[in-house]
Image (tube, grey):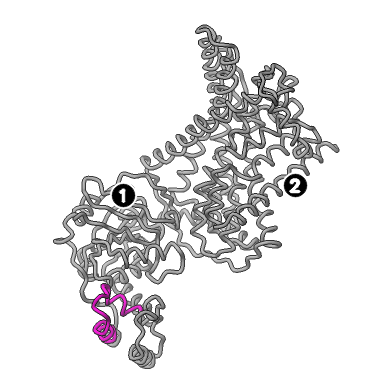
Amino acid sequence: MAKHCALVGNQNSGKTLLFNVLTGLNQKVGNWPGVTVERKDGMIRGTDIEITDLPGIYSLSPYTSEEEISRRFVVEQRPDVIINIIDSTSIERALYLTTQLMELNTKVLVVLNMEDILAKKGYHIDIKKFSKLLGTTCVSISALKKTGIQELIDCVVHSDEKINTVKESRIFSDSVEHLISEIMLKLDSDVYEKRFAAVKIIERDQRYYSRYYQEEFESEIRALEEREHNDTEQLIASQRYTYIEKLRDETVTRKNSVSVTEKIDHILLNKWLAIPIFLVIMLVVYLLSVGFVGGATVGIVDMLFNGGNEIEFAIPFASFTVEVGEVQGLGPWLAECITNAGGSDWAASLVADGAVAGVGAVCNFVPQIMILFLLISLLETCGYMSRVTFLFDRAFKKIGMSGKSLIPFIVGTGCSVPAIMGARTIENREEHQMTVTLTPFMPCSAKLPIITCFIAGVFAPLMGKSNTWLITFSMYLLAVLVIVLAGFLLNKFFVKNKNTSYITELPEYHVPSAEYVARDVWDKTWAFIKRAGTIIFLCSVVVWVLLNVDYQFHFTENIEESLLANIGRSISWIFAPMLGMEFSWGASVSAIQGLVAKEAVVSSMEVITAVEEGGDVFAGNGSFAFFNGFSAMGYMIFTLFSAPCFGAIGAIRREIGSTKGMWKAILFETGLAWVLASAVGIWGALL
């Protein structure tokens, strides 16, 4: 019969990274607590052993839904081996859970992770003595460096010989041990984890105390409390920590007085420098991704799709054009092939002006999105982002949230869907609801094409092409301000959460794993490309068809008589205030496309422009030529901060738990976005 293992440990102990190493899967890894929010299953490579990665917990007395998932699994599913992963740089905190796991009448393999970080900090753990005193098998590994992994696997494979089930305890005082033994003798024979249950009864844990209550138990517990002058829950906890401290003192030695992490934090968490340093780091992120890489690659990718004879480079502090000779481009080439093969002009236009123009408009931004993913992933995995949550905790408390809410916001720069799901690590119900509602305000990778499109078409002529990367950075700062404003409004008038708290440990700084970062960036980029190849392709084709038929579905050459134009005119009054009182059917239908996928806003505009034969989106006398600085800013604000795409809306529904709550969230987001966008557009019209 195949074995089943459970991977159990504190949050941020390297659990999911080890799971990936053992199984070859690529689950989300982040150097902050709470990355795993539900159980994940896989097979240890080269074996028939199934392993389950459980949400991080600190004890088997759960307070959150994630902790309850882990407790129920290890207690009720009874895995053959519990792999208890421990951050070896923080064993005092981690061993509390270990002492509970060893009471479950099962095999526990203790894995001391981050041995490389421990050595850099100047610490050393005597593994043999540690294992002997703890009473179970222990191995030392580095999941990041992949050292000690084979020894771990060997222990699991040969667990019958190498791992003993802990039968006796050396943790509690004689009086406590005597009471534990008395209760164990009186429990039913079908209780598998008798020692664990006995301890929980003594602690008056309601999951066990109410189930196995006996008046005799209560009298003996009270007698123990009177003798020890302490309630039993505190007594048990105190004796666990006394045991842990003794174990630490006998097995851990330190050579150096100050670690590298402590030296770095002395600067990065400085009272006066912390926030400016964070702003500078994020400025550099967008300078590199949108500025240098975006400015150097957008023209190249656009030429590959649409053709031309020159490439324009608009990198920070410089702008120039390079003549490259005539390049046909994918769209014109496919159109020519269709025409030469006897295809009709409308078929050629469908492919070139519909599918290729729409998909190409989004693919232009793939290189800069890759760099953005790369830089954010590096900041996540090295440990800096967990410091950012600590920095903003005090500010977030003023609007009814905590630093824990910042984690979904940061993840949201990649995609809103996993970011919204990540909010489930927040225990406070009101804070969780606020975080789910506010996370879509963070510009995700799908919104970057919208920003870049308007920067190139509207703001570049106004402020110089080499300086437009500042607009991108300012839009992300604006997102933070909108989140603060929206949080204030929610907390003041709707949710009214006053009970926020955030306790976290600051992990050691790690050198990011090149393999993990590469896989993480590739997975996110490939997901973006697949959206362009499927959803955006479909949207582009639909837009082209609606642009070329009238309300009777007859083909028309007059775009103003098309079905799409008529639909756009019927709703253009909604968008007129943010456009400076311009009634634009093209801008209206493009904004609605953003509900399907935010990238579709750009692809829709590109298809409309291609059918109009207007050249560039904002050039000539086409549907978008009226945009100026104010109307462009208003339109961007609405498309960035209004209701997210359908995928994110579905995630909001799942996390909030009701359709009514979902509608409240998206109406609040869209209403606030419309008010802010209209204020900017009308202000520009009045000037």
Q: Residues within 10 Å of mark 1 (few under 14, many from 20)?
A: some
> Looking at this view, is 40 or 514 the one in front?
40
**Badge 1 amino acid:** Gly
> Looking at this view, is 296 or 575 the one in front?
575
Q: Earlier in the sequence, mark 2 or mark 1?
A: 1
The percent coordinates of residue 476 (x first, y second) are 62, 43
In the picture of the structure, the residue carrying the numbered disc 2 is: 675
Q: Quadrant of the N terminus?
A: bottom left
Q: Is residue 193 magenta?
A: yes
Q: CA distance from mark 2 to mark 1?
A: 48 Å
Which contiguous range is marked in magenta? 178-200
Q: Residue furthest right?
A: 686
The percent coordinates of residue 605 (x first, y second) are 65, 28
Q: Main secondary structure of the magenta part?
A: helix
Which numbered marker is on residue 230? none
Q: Does 607 sit above or below residue 521?
A: above
Q: Is residue 209 magenta?
A: no
The percent coordinates of residue 210 (x first, y second) are 39, 81
Left or right, 3 with reference to 569: left
Left or right, 666 with reference to 14: right
The percent coordinates of residue 37 (x first, y second) are 44, 56
Q: Does 278 sit above or below residue 352?
A: below
In the picture of the structure, the residue carrying the numbered disc 1 is: 42
Q: Residue at 66% across / 65% down in the picture?
A: 496
Q: Residue at 69% across / 24% down in the picture?
A: 552
Q: Which picture quadrant has residue 102?
A: bottom left
Q: Is residue 481 visible?
A: no
> Looking at this view, is 178 or 656 the one in front?
656
- Does dot 1 land on a helix, a strand or a loop? strand
Q: Residues within 10 Å of mark 2 (few under 14, many from 20)?
A: some
Q: Does 561 sit above or below residue 309?
A: below
